[in-house]
């Protein structure tokens, strides 16, 4: 699909066949007509085509005549064996006044799990539940599924407390549910019993396709878990837990037939697996790798767990023809988009044009990733979703902009990491804009809650009423955030993580005062009573509201377009000749990943930036960087992984940082000449791969009190000019240190560009950029485990 115009299909003409002349016939045949597909269904067809493989059969006849008929037949046999083993039905003659429902085979090819390329052939026998009648064939149909927030909370706990995480799958889960109604079904194609072809299947167990199947399966599973002395969480009925004798817990999360089990005790996990296998037919998938289309990647040694949807997003981009030639963008939605109902079609030509655009399909695809792993697009997707009933060309341009942003950040996801100094549990951030909706002048509420350094719950939504002031808008936003905080607090308490109160940060001091001041005020009397419950919650001490600077408010990106960030991203390309960036002693807390745009940077100095904790992974893209000075960064604990060999980085200064070790990928810095680790008091070891620094001449390790031994491989660095000794200074001949030469330009115009470039780069840590990149991380930084 072209980035500026939708795909079009030739309308099928209505064809009318003339009746043939038949001399021996009295009457003519009725003409046959080919019905044209309504244009309003074009986007639905466009959605279905990319996700249905051409070589997957749709009927039994196609399956047995398919080149892969052996594999499909084997899969059907396995399905029938499961059905018979489970005693799903019994063959009977159809009673009078009873009707049957049909059934069909559904075929699918499943991708293998990460690092497994084999294709799985899967076949299901599905009842045609659409023929069921309410009150006769079924009654209640509701069945709960685990909330996405609960999944993220479990992953955060896995990272924070270093517990085991495994995944299981229930084979033919719906067949385990006991059927309460009397339902008759035709025999499946290809498996009709000889001599009983006219008999029917009287269902005794629930079957895929029946409206009540999910409910009956959950009811059966719930009874089983309670029988094993597991407790169902009161706030999420698909979360089960049990307290062990040593005081720890074992947790189980259920999403239809997918399970996640987590515990510190491997024995308890194996015990639960055995119990499940005795009751149901299970498939052990080992360590959790993928659930609901979300890839789970874990670096246990470093206490990190990432959650991303790289494969899903690649399919979405392919579906909407976002190829490598499409120009990517660096913001979810640019500030020049002023979306309103006025952009909706006003002429028939415009309406016909938009009928050919898969607008609803695109927004729906984006919504799923927004709900699962991408809080950074919540505000943008929320805006374009308001016009799904009547979108215009301007709205479609905004959707394509979001897709272009996804193309640039396809491997971005959530990152949870262990922090020994955390101690704060769940933390909330809330924000609101003011009258941002151009149609009804309503404000937008945004909140996000984090645990173990990553977001576990977020929301960006239009407020239900018009706010008369910014204070009122912030006050209503706080109410929504507090409601979510109460739910999270209760959920964690049930899981054994009681938290006395949750800190919620807001950048509006007047709104915070309003939540604490219960005195009647003329300017707030019109506010709905439902918003005032927050005062009672705050008064009880369940929630602690605190002021935070706007530039540090992580919820800011959920309520407005990233203004300052876009200026850096758009204008950084205008300064390709910047070779030196100095932020000595500034209050920078985090660098934006867009620093990669300053691709000619040779020297980067962050000496004395005491609040800077980490560098973005994209710093590896600075291929000309020769000097990196991070001396005096008191909170800097981790040197970033490298993804490719770099010969240009000659000097690395980490003096006085809180770094605990160097990554094994340090060997890729083959051109490094000087490595200064002086006074790194938390440094405990050096990686054995340090011998990869073939050009290393100076290694400073004095003051590294916790470093006791050096790897033997260090002795293989022949270029090293000083002897290895943890207690001495490593500069016998400092004159021999090769100093990198920074190419400078003397022109005044260049100096102005440098100053301007530094100023622009500094704004990258402002509101949206800081918030966004604190919450989402690049999943490619995680190793393949």
Image (tube, rainbow, N blue to C red):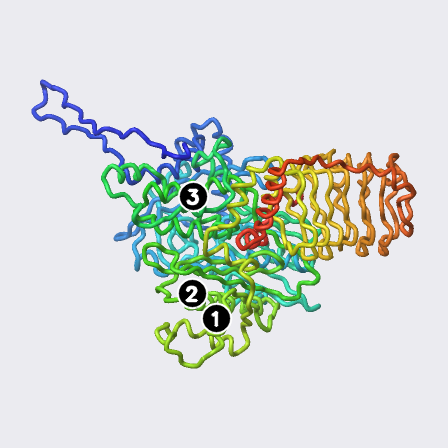
Q: Secondary structure at mark 1?
A: helix
Give coordinates of residue 189: x percent, y percent: 39, 38
Q: Secondary structure at mark 2?
A: helix
Please tell me which residue is depicted at 70% across the width and 61% down the height of the picture: 420
Q: Is residue 767 left or right of residue 183?
A: right
Mark linked to residue 17: none
**Which label's residue is closer to the chain start, 3 or 2?**
3
| Foreground: disc 3 or disc 1 | 1
Mark linked to residue 470: 2
Give coordinates of residue 647: x percent, y percent: 74, 33
Please tell me which residue is depicted at 80% across the width and 40% down the height of the picture: 689
Furthest residue toward left? 26
Name the residue tied to disc 3: 125
Front in this rendered view, residue 367 or 394: 394
Please tell me which residue is depicted at 86% across the width and 56% down the height of the picture: 705
Residues marked 1 and 2 touching at CB (< 8 Å): yes
**Which label's residue is closer to the chain start, 1 or 2?**
2
Q: CA distance from mark 3 to mark 2?
A: 56 Å
Front in this rendered view, residue 103 or 204: 103
Give coordinates of residue 292: x percent, y percent: 51, 49
In the depicted structure, whether residue 78 falls above or below residue 153: above
Q: Secondary structure at mark 3?
A: strand
Q: Is residue 148 left or right of residue 263?
A: left
Figure quadrant of the N terminus: top left
Q: CA distance from mark 1 to mark 2?
A: 9 Å
The image quarter in which residue 115 lies:
top right
Instruction: Tell me if residue 136 can be seen.
Output: yes
Give coordinates of residue 239: x percent, y percent: 54, 62
Residues marked 3 and 1 touching at CB (< 8 Å): no
In the depicted structure, whether residue 22 falls above or below residue 626: above
Name the residue tied to disc 1: 510
């Amino acid at each position: 699909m072209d980035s500026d115009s939708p795909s079009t299909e030739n309308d099928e003409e209505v064809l009318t066949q003339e009746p043939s002349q038949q001399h021996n016939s009295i009457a003519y045949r009725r003409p046959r007509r080919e019905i044209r597909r309504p244009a309003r269904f074009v986007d639905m067809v466009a959605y279905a085509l990319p996700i249905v493989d051409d070589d997957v059969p749709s009927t039994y006849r196609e399956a047995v005549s398919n080149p892969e008929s052996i594999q499909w037949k084997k899969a059907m046999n396995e399905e029938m064996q499961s059905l018979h083993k489970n005693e799903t039905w019994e063959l009977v003659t159809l009673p009078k006044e009873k009707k049957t429902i049909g059934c069909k085979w559904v075929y699918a090819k499943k991708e293998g799990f990460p690092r497994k390329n084999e294709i799985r052939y899967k076949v299901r026998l599905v009842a045609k539940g659409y023929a069921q009648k309410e009150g006769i064939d079924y009654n209640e149909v509701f069945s709960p599924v685990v909330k996405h927030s609960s999944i993220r909370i479990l992953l955060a706990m896995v990272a924070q407390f270093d517990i085991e995480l495994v995944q299981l799958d229930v084979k033919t889960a719906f067949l385990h549910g006991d059927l309460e109604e009397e339902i008759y079904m035709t025999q499946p194609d290809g498996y009709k019993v000889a001599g009983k072809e006219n008999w029917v299947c009287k269902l005794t167990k629930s079957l895929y396709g029946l409206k009540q199947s999910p409910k009956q399966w959950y009811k059966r599973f719930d009874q089983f878990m309670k029988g094993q002395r597991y407790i169902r969480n009161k706030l999420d009925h698909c979360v089960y837990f049990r307290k062990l004798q040593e005081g720890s817990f074992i947790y189980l999360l259920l999403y239809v037939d997918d399970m996640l089990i987590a515990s510190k005790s491997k024995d308890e996990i194996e015990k639960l697996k055995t119990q499940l296998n005795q009751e149901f037919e299970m498939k052990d998938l080992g360590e959790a790798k993928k659930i609901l289309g979300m890839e789970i990647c874990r670096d246990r040694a470093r206490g990190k767990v990432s959650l991303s949807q790289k494969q899903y997003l690649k399919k979405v981009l392919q579906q909407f023809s976002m190829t490598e030639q499409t120009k990517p963008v660096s913001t979810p939605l640019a500030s020049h988009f002023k979306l309103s109902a006025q952009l909706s079609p006003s002429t028939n030509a415009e309406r016909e044009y938009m009928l050919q655009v898969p607008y609803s399909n695109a927004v729906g695809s984006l919504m799923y990733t927004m709900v699962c792993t991408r809080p950074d697009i919540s505000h943008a997707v929320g805006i374009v979703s308001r016009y799904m009933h009547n979108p215009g060309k301007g709205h479609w341009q905004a959707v394509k902009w979001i897709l272009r942003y996804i193309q640039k950040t396809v491997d971005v996801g959530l990152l949870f990491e262990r922090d020994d100094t955390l101690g704060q549990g769940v933390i909330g951030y809330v924000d609101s804009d003011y009258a941002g909706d151009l149609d009804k002048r309503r404000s937008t509420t945004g909140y996000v809650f984090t645990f173990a350094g990553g977001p576990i719950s977020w929301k960006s939504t239009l407020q239900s009423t018009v706010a008369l002031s910014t204070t009122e808008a912030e006050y209503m936003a706080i109410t929504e955030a507090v409601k979510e905080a109460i739910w999270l607090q209760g959920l964690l308490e049930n899981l054994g993580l009681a938290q006395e109160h949750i800190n919620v940060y807001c950048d509006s001091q007047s709104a915070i005062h309003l939540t604490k001041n219960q005195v009647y005020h003329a300017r707030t009397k019109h506010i709905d009573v439902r918003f005032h419950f927050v005062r009672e919650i705050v008064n009880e001490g369940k929630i602690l509201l605190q002021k935070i600077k706007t530039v540090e408010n992580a919820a800011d990106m959920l309520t407005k377009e990233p203004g300052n960030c876009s200026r850096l991203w758009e204008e950084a390309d205008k300064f390709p000749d910047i070779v030196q960036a100095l932020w000595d002693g500034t209050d920078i807390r985090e660098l934006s990943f867009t620093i990669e745009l300053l691709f000619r940077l040779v020297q980067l100095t962050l000496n004395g930036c005491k609040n800077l904790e980490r560098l973005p992974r994209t710093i590896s893209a600075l291929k000309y960087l020769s000097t990196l000075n991070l001396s005096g960064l008191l909170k800097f604990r981790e040197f970033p992984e490298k993804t490719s060999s770099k010969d240009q980085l000659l000097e690395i200064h980490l003096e006085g940082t809180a770094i605990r070790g160097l990554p094994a990928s340090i060997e890729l810095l083959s051109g490094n000449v000087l490595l200064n680790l002086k006074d790194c008091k938390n440094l405990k070891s050096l990686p054995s791969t340090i011998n990869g620094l073939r050009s290393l001449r100076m290694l400073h390790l004095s003051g590294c009190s916790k470093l006791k031994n050096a790897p033997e491989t260090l002795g293989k660095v022949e270029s090293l000019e000083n002897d290895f000794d943890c207690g001495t200074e490593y500069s016998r001949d400092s004159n021999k240190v090769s100093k990198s030469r920074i190419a400078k330009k003397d022109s005044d115009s260049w100096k102005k560009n440098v100053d301007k470039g530094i100023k622009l780069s500094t704004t990258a840590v402002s509101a949206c950029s800081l918030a966004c990149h604190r919450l989402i991380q690049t999943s490619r930084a995680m190793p393949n485990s």
